[in-house]
Image (spheres, rainbow, N blue to C red):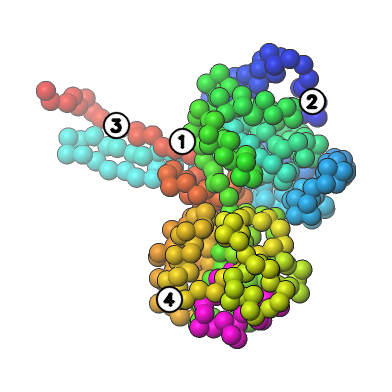
Amino acid sequence: MNSMQAVEGSAGDLGAIMNGLGHAAAASRAALAQSSGATRNAALLAAAQAIRANAATIIAANARDMEAARARGLSVAMLDRLQLNDKRVESMAAGIEQIAALDDPIGGVSAEWSRPNGLTIQRVRVPLGVIGIIYESRPNVTADAGALCLKSANPVILRGGSESRFSSAAIHDCLVAGLRAAGLPEAAIQLVPTTDRAAVGMMLAGLDQQINVIVPRGGRSLVERVQKEARVPVIGHLEGLCHVYVDRDADADMARSIVVNAKLRRTGICGSAETLLVDRACAPSMLPMLLNALADGGCELRGDAATQAVDKRVKAATEQDWRTEYLDAIISVRVVDGVDEAIRHIATYGSAHTDSIVTANAATAEKFLREVDSAIVLHNASTQFADGGEFGMGAEIGISTDRFHARGPVGVEQLTSYKYVVRGSGQVRPG
């Protein structure tokens, strides 16, 4: 079925189609797992070439999505997440090439040892299996997720948001062209051909036990639904409630640059800072400058009483503000009594995603990096570096805040598991 087609009909028809996707993905699993890294890289490079060759088609498809999104009244931040242009299409193609350039994660030996009885044991990297990825708005996830799963030899079923249906379909066609060029099963990367929300429930149920892992990437309501309903393991994060703490020993120019970038570079991504914490010891000099810089950038300011006292543009922050992922040009600001209170605030309100400290004091920085229990902690750097590409992973499916299997950017290595290969020479275990 062409990925531009929609599926209409009864629930039974939809169930048959979705289970068909699951079985087709599972059927491609052996061929993908047994393929060489060179073959998978050839598919990736052909897909990148197809994206470049079809850039005009992809952008035209995106224009249809953008028109519908504006008619639905999507926010400026959400429209930014959705929009594609020449630069972003080229970035998708380059990202796929970066993934192709990574070392093959499959078959690598991560540990090896021998036992006194002569057995030799190896821990060997293997694919996770069929991965279902459910995401919203950002069509580039289609390219990133498809490429990462292909690199790690995992068949994938992609279910993009209705907002990006035409964009995702055009990108998916390029990924399939790459598979075809390399002689790999086209079912290794499939796109759910319907916007019916019932399809999500079917994926969460496992598609007749064919899906091995679900990865959600989207807003809180999507991730909560996935975590509540999924009958297969989930890798994901609930939200990106990120903080920047400006310490008493921070350089003023550095603090201004980092805070503005962390909040306003792209407000609609999960690494965007939602809360600014400022040390009371430097607030008289630092806070007015930071508030002015944010306001000049078009950011709405919400803050505690101490922050409101500094700038009349600051609206009173509610308890809910400290717990809100705005994904918009809005920031909550609080004055705290040093690094210890900053750490307590983050522990109370944060989502264990990404948090940063700005300070010239190495001891204070190390305390923050050690005690803040988030997937990513930074010193003197913007939270917007919470990105697999910036970590040298080529791309990532998302930032996991889980504490098992994968944490932080989920790249090719995090999409693998391992098995133990044991070699003997006739050993039997004594009774």
Magenta stretch: dominant SS? helix
Instruction: Identify the image quadrant of residue 114.
Output: top left
Q: Tell me the SS state at disc 2.
A: loop
In the image shown, does 64 or 371 lie closer to the viewer?
371
Q: Earlier in the sequence, mark 4 or mark 2?
A: 2
Q: Which residue is mark 2?
A: 6
- Residue designated by label 4: 364
Q: Is residue 74 above or below residue 210?
A: below
Question: In the rendered structure, which amino acid carries the disc numbered 1?
Answer: Val
Q: Residue at label 3?
A: 423
Circle 3: residue type: Arg
Question: In terms of depth relative to the viewer, which is nearer, 265 or 175?
Answer: 265
Gap in angstroms between the C-alphas marked 3 and 1: 18 Å
Image location of residue 180, percent across then percent down: 71, 30
Circle 4 residues within 10 Å: few <14, some 14–19, many ≥20: many
Labels 4, 3: front one: 4
